[in-house]
Image (cartoon, rainbow, N blue to C red):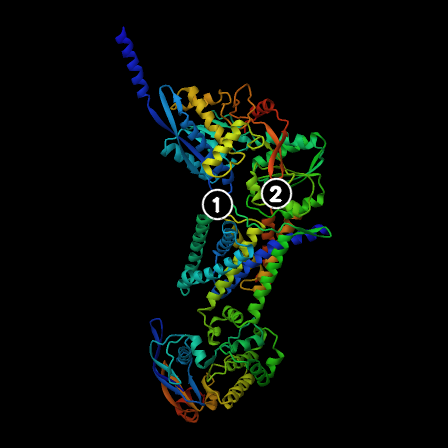
Amino acid sequence: MKLTAMTAALALMAGAAWAEEKTLDIGVSDALTGGGAVYGLPQTNAVKLAAKEINASGGIKVGDDVYMLNVIAYDDKANPTEASNAVRKLIDRDGVKYILGFCCSGATGAVASFIEFEDAVMLVGNAAERSITTREIPNLTRTRPPADYTGAAAGTFVAEKGHKRVAVLGALDVGFYASYVDAFEKELEKAGGEIVSREAFGLKDRDMSPQLTKIRGQEPDAILVVGYVEPAAFIYRQAVELGIDVPRYGFTSGSEEQFTRVATSEQMEGVWDLRPTELTLLSASENGKAYHANYTEEFGIAPSPSSPYSYDQTYALKDAIEAAGTVEDTEAVAAALRDIAVPDEVVMQYLPVDEKMFDQNGQAYTSNGAFQWQSGNWVFVQDLPSDAAAYSAFLSTLDD
Amino acid sequence: MVEVLQQIINGIAIGGVYVLIALGLTTVFGILGIAHFAHGSVSMFGGYLTFFFVTSWGFPLLLAILIALLVGLMLGVLIELLAYRPVRDANHINAFIVALGLTMMVEGINLELFGHEQVVIPTDFSRVFNFGGVTIPELRLYVILAAALLIAAMTVFVERTKTGQAIRAVAENRDAAILMGVNVKTIPLVVFAISTALGVCAGVMVGSLFAIAPGIGEGLVVKGFAVLILGGLGSIPGAVVGGLVLGITEALAAGFISSAYKDVIAFVVMISVLLFRPQGLMGKA
Amino acid sequence: MLNVSNLRVSYGAIEVIHGIDLQVNQGECVALIGANGAGKSSTLKAICGLVPATAGTIEFEGQDITNQSGHSIVKAGITMCPEGRQVFPQMTTLQNLKMGAYPRKDAEQAADVEEMMDMFPILRDRAGQAAGTLSGGEQEMLAIGRALMARPKLCIFDEPSLGLAPKIVAEVGETIARVKEMGKTILLVEQNSAMALRLADRAYLFEAGEIVLSGTGAELQSHPDVAKAYLGH
């Protein structure tokens, strides 16, 4: 009897000793250079940070095996062709099954168009184009809510502020920015307001004073700036230079540092950013504060507000793999992703639908917030009126 | 009316930058018949350098610009000696390929040394002047004044100095210039040094007014050549008029027609001008 | 003053000057005559450093200037008034004249400009006008004036009468005579052999890249071959 017990104990010990420590390669396709790098580089860093933390706390446990994460990141330059190539390389050459990152809609849309036919799972971060999650691709999920979900909330907020004539200056050739503005307009019009002009600028434009001069002539109650951080920062600065003193609202998700590189803090004073409640130091949860500190220590620079989308992806992936009990069966992992609750470690403030992090479209929802620039910082002022369940139902009715 | 004036002011600043870029391109083209595509990237290098001196070494802005200018002068001499002189007497396609190769090289060096992030040269000029509703930010005013000063200096140099006249002479008739005793080996050095220095000034202006980032220099050089064609190849007054016309047209197009198509409209205006004056605004038929 | 010996010039593989010797002495006016393509202009270009000499030497005031760069030959004191005038078309008449004084560093340039304008009054009327808008005869005067602005020791004229109206040709001839009276040494290439030989103290006759005849202007003028082939009588 004793012998049996000892044998059993030995066997258990041996079993434990033989529980192999394996490596699981996860891929990142994101913009590391070029215009999209302001979003893509921090996202890539965030995946690396999450992987390091997961490894340090014992890795991902699948049955008897423990997997340590190894991150392989490629630069897709926010370009559709480059992104397709990067993902092909990850799947075909590196044998990767889980691909994260994806900051920018054009590149993400290109990969989303073929990922369904691959033995892989795609986790989309900051890309905001709505159509990425309208086709219910079973092996794709996204942490960031679509732009129009936020745009509608922003429209309601600005209407509640009493503004009737809003001038829009945006990167309107980019689909998701245009859809933000459309949803914004719908809500504004419900309250009797109108958009008095829609001016456009390109990603590389830095002189928006002609557009602003035109807007100044229309005497709007407020302006709405929708676009990438770098041109947006110039717009805020040039608006002041042109003596435009109406409230400035925006949808840009840039960090303090990104803005002060272009405009002075005085020029930014009072600007609103109406966006998903992303990371800001003053509003962050305990997780957010820890993330900010760890990220800053690891990379020597503060994380961008949108970077946690990919950090959270990594933890969602961990939970899904552990729930599915396999790293090989990507279908099972993809199904598990749509079934998990919001992981404890996430930084963003998700609004679960049916208590699940991702809805049947593979879409997650965060709360939306109104942030205002006050003396050099983005300060969280209030939640925007957002209805995740209603939007999720609406998203399910779309299929283009 | 205020709006039109404001748009014109808006356009003059960027127009001034176009003029400086085009002046460099036009003198090089006039003397050597070379389309110096690398000019934009070299100009941005000057802007980056100024940024680096100010932010990393804490130099005062003017000192940083001065050093960048001197580096620009030397860089121009080196470019002529090492890149273009060896293909001086060869087929024109050789110089063309050298120009393209040089562009890629300088862009690569910029990326390697200064990274991919956009760079804004910090200045303390954040006041805004208001003249009856037309606003001019302090920095823009300085940029416009500096551009005007440089254009005036360049004009005086070309019209009133011996070296300047020699540059014109070589551009108009190389063999006759030799017979006047002009050393046609040193003139290109002078031309490249001056062009590059003007380019560096443009780079600093772009970098402080807007931002320097990979690709910006290439965009500027395209505008520079557009100005050259608009104003008349090799013509200095043409570069000045062409640059201002392009800058102001862009601003008016964005302000009164469509901001999405401002570049298209500017090029349509350019093509229409060329239909009626194929030699350019100031070019000789 | 100028001593050319055994000069050979080639364009690529084709030799166009087959070893010629010629001299120009101080104060002389020497003419090179001959048919089109006989090698007169190539000889001048070699002297001025515009084309390289493949063999032989060119000495100026005892100094070897063979294959020197064009601008140092100008500095040495040789100026050419080129064929087709070659004024700088977009520069003004005044700027063209000043360009002529490019190698000079002295303070008398302004005075010389005045002198040229006295010599060619039409240039004064046209001073502010772009040189390209001047008539052919005016441009020729400008080209001559511009060449003199360098205060050359040796002044070379390459086909000064080419393409000008007969009345202007005579005027050009007079001008060259005046330049000679100023004490300048002159080397003249001219298709109009009659005019050239009238002006010249001595002359060389070129044929197919060689000098076939030389002598005083009067000698050549009366030489039967020359008279028949080039003077048309």
Which residue reaches farthest top?
Answer: A1
Farthest left residue in view: A3
Name the side, left or right, on which A204 lies relative to C51. right
Q: Is mark 2 on a helix, strand or loop?
A: helix
Which chain hosts label 1? B
Circle 1 SS class: loop
Query: The N terminus of chain A lies in which quarter of the figure?
Result: top left
Percent x, y of residue A197: 67, 40
Q: Identify whether B83 is placed above or below A328.
A: below
Label 2: how many Cα within 10 Å (few below 14, some 14–19, many 20+): some
Q: Is residue A143 left or right of residue A55?
A: right
| Residue A77 appearing in the image | yes
Q: Which of A254 and B172 is in front in this view?
A: A254
> Gap between marks 2 and 1, in whole Å?
24 Å
Residue at the location (51% across, 37% down)?
Answer: A302
Q: Residue at x 60, y 23 (%)?
A: A390
Above or below: residue A393 compared with residue A303 = above
> Which residue does the numbered mark 1 point to in the structure image?
B116
Per the image, the residue denoted by label 2 is A265
| Residue nearer the viewer, C8 or A94 | A94
Q: Residues within 10 Å of mark 1 (few under 14, many from 20)?
A: some
Tag 2 and tag 1 share a subunit: no
- Rendering coords of residue A76 (x, y %): 45, 39
- Name the spot of residue C224 as percent of width and height, x first: 40, 92
**Rendered image quadrant of residue C126:** bottom right
Instruction: Name the kind of residue labelled 2 in the image.
Output: Ser
Percent across and percent down for residue C157 are: 47, 82
Residue B92 visible, this angle: no
* Residue at mark 2: chain: A
Whether A155 is drawn above or below B26: the answer is: above
**Amino acid at circle 1:** His
Residue nearer the viewer, C138 or B78: B78
